[in-house]
Image (cartoon, rainbow, N blue to C red):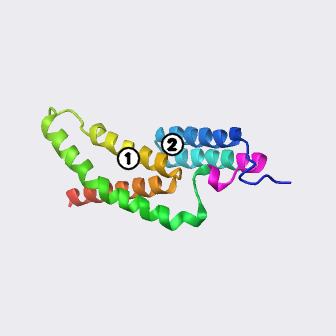
Amino acid sequence: MRPTGKEIPIRCNQCVKQICAIGIVLLLGVTTSVGAVAKLLTLGLALCWVRFTAGATLGDLGIVPGRLWADIQLGIWAFLAITIPVYVLLAVATSLLPENTVADPIPLLLLAAVLGGLYYRSHRIVPAIVLHMAFNATSVSLALWTLW
């Protein structure tokens, strides 16, 4: 008999979170597309292993299918609320710091706090992923716009 989401022991939930954290750390050091694919496959296999051996569900990963649209909306609202303050803080930090100093970590600390707070308050990962994707898309768009 397969366990339901209510019967999954705490150690399974902790295992899923540890595997996701390890996967994120692995992806941070990626320098090639082949390395990225290899690391994503490793993460995917680890998640499949947890799913089929311990019966982990999407809920253990912080994904609630019935609330997906509400989570996407929450992520978009968080993006709208945080984008302008982050870029204003970046502009201020760039103007105050010496010329050869990179100011990116200062405003990104604010973004990281919002991402963590979003997960802490909702206990779902989708809003934080949507916020992160929208913020990265904005950053790439602004970088491409400055090249033209």
Q: Residues within 10 Å of mark 1 (few under 14, many from 20)?
A: some
Q: Quadrant of residue 65?
A: bottom right
Name the residue beneath numbered marker 1.
114
Nearer-the-camera pick, 41 or 91: 91
Judge from the rendering whether residue 99 lies leftward or rightward of residue 11; answer left or right.
Answer: left
Left or right of 60: which side holds 21? Answer: left
Q: Can the viewer see residue 80? A: yes
Q: Amino acid at mark 2?
A: Leu
**Residue corresponding to mark 2:** 27
Residue in the image at 50% along x and 49% along y: 33
Drawn side of residue 73 relative to residue 67, left or right: left
Task: Locate residue 131: give its quadrant.
Answer: bottom left
Q: Earlier in the sequence, mark 2 or mark 1?
A: 2
Q: Residue at x 53, y 53 (%)?
A: 124
Question: What type of secondary structure mainly makes up the magenta span?
Answer: helix
Give the residue type that dot 1 points to: Val
Q: Is residue 137 visible?
A: no
For label 2, the SS is helix
Q: Nearer the viewer, residue 137 or 60?
A: 60
Q: Position of residue 42 (x, y in %)?
A: 63, 44
Is disc 1 placed on a helix, strand or loop? Answer: helix
The residues colored magenta run 49-60
